[in-house]
Amino acid sequence: QVQLVESGGGLVQDGGSLRLSCAASGRTFSNYAGGWFRQAPGKEREFVAAVSWTWTGGNTFYADSVKGRFTISRDNAQNTMYLQMDNLKPEDTAVYYCAASRYRIPDAVRNAEVWGQGTLVTVSS
């Protein structure tokens, strides 16, 4: 299976931007669909964004709460997936996890096969 490692989290002010990276190793990442999830304190893990396999067009999917502010992308040559987060809000504060799946688009927790360890994003008001 592929292994995933996130990076890029940190502290940012309301309205600021961050770019998260998810580095994949162990298997060819192009064989996987990828996704981002987040979990705020005391809340369940929730879907943020997903990108399909390249040979199906690399289609992207977003939760309504981040649509128009976040952009998911993948660079198969670098075995890396990204989440560009713009116009961040305090309610975006959470631990962000990347995920991958060979057979399903990871647009729900149950569809993700592999998880990274998470990276904390804190948005101050």
Image (cartoon, grey):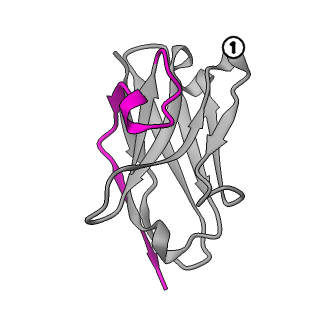
Where is 84 relative to 107, above or below? below
Classify residue 108 as left or right of residue 31: left
Classify residue 123 as left or right of residue 82: left
| Residue 97, magenta (yes or no) | no
Q: Which residues are magenta?
A: 102-125
Residue 118 visible, this angle: yes
| Residue 113, magenta (yes or no) | yes
Where disc 1 sits, the SS reads helix
**Image position, residue 94 (x, y; %):** 38, 62
Residue at position x 67%, y 36% in the image: 60
Q: Amino acid at mark 1?
A: Trp
Q: Which residue is mark 1?
A: 55
Residue at position x 40%, y 22% in the image: 25
**Image position, residue 76 (x, y; %):** 60, 23
Where is 96 relative to 33, above or below? below
What is the quadrant of residue 51 in the picture? Answer: top right
Where is 27 relative to 82, above or below? above
